[in-house]
Image (cartoon, grey):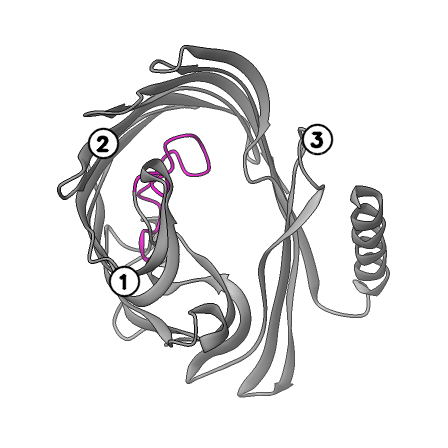
Amino acid sequence: MKLTKSAIALALLSSFSLSAAAADVVIYGKVNVTFQYSDDKEEGNRFTEVKSNASRIGFKGDHSINDDLMVVYQAEFQVDIDGDDDNFTERTQFLGLQGNFGKVYLGKMDTMLKQSQGKVDLFNDLETDIKVLWTGENRSSNVLAYMSPSFGGFKFGATYLAEEQTNDDRGYSVAAFYGDANLKKSKFYASLAHDSNVEGETRAFGEKGSYDTTRATVQTKVAGVKLGAIYHTQEDVETGAELDGYMVSASYAIDQWTLKGQYQVADMKGVEEKTGYSIGADYRLAKPTKAFVFYSAIDSDNSDDKEWLGVGLEHKF
């Protein structure tokens, strides 16, 4: 199976590469690999591993139909550099139309609630990615989505999930955005998002289901320090189980170094409270390349605690 998938992926790469000269196709990607030590304190399970953290390769582009309308498309695949899993699995994939009205697209993509967190999660794709303690970080299939143009810095987005992905019940995800998530075009970023009946999971609690989720996010920069915060609440549609939480993050750049820290709380009502926290430092070797080190932990009221210590390398292309 791995050989078959690899052969298919190589064929796709070749076909995209050969046609790149004839179309506006951009090939991009990211390789992120860590060597890390893991410690499951409750079970006494300690081990080292090499881990690929959502490494990926993708193809994207557009084609003008007329002065007011263009076709946009993207096909992105996760690549497991450490060799543990199948080499290629699908990530964001869509085909759409873009114009003065905004963008409408169909395929598999991040819900608006997932997109709303912007760049506040400083340890995204690592062990204390916010998706571990909360639901809502969903990349859903069979999606119709719309993103509005900017109106004075404000945008609105909506994701409709066809019944096939929600056990014959429709789901949707909506969000309002203000500012630039990279804090380059604006000094402030904020969003408010809501999921209704969207399938997901809360990994740290071992829960899966369809959830109603609301999330508010803010980020800004004060005296050179990037500060971010998220308030999050979720409810399992079937069981009524509720979880509330918040997350704060901060980072500070000194020459080639970026120092960062993050703290997250997830309170599953009537079950237990878990907290996740991380500290780390990135060192930029070149514009697309960085080395980094991190320490992360998840503490629980009445279940196993976990911690990780790792070093890694990331290259974007």
Residue 83 circle label: 3
Q: Amino acid at mark 1?
A: Glu
Rendered location of residue 124, percent (x, y): 41, 38
Rendered location of residue 293, percent (x, y): 45, 18
- Please tell me which residue is depicted at 41% across the width and 85% down the height of the picture: 101
Task: Mark 1: give few (<14), some (14-19) or many (20+) Cα within 10 Å.
Answer: few
Residue 280 appearing in the image? yes
* Left or right placement of residue 71 versus residue 150 in this view: right
From the viewer's side, name the closer residue of 145 and 5: 5
From the viewer's side, name the closer residue of 73 and 300: 300
Residue that mark 1 sits on: 238
**Gap in angstroms between the C-alphas marked 2 and 1:** 23 Å
* Magenta segment main secondary structure: loop
Query: Which residues make up the magenta segment?
Result: 116-133
Secondary structure at numbered mark 3: loop
Label located before the other in sequence (3 or 1)? 3
Residue 162 appearing in the image? no
Q: Amino acid at mark 2?
A: Lys
Residue 274 circle label: 2
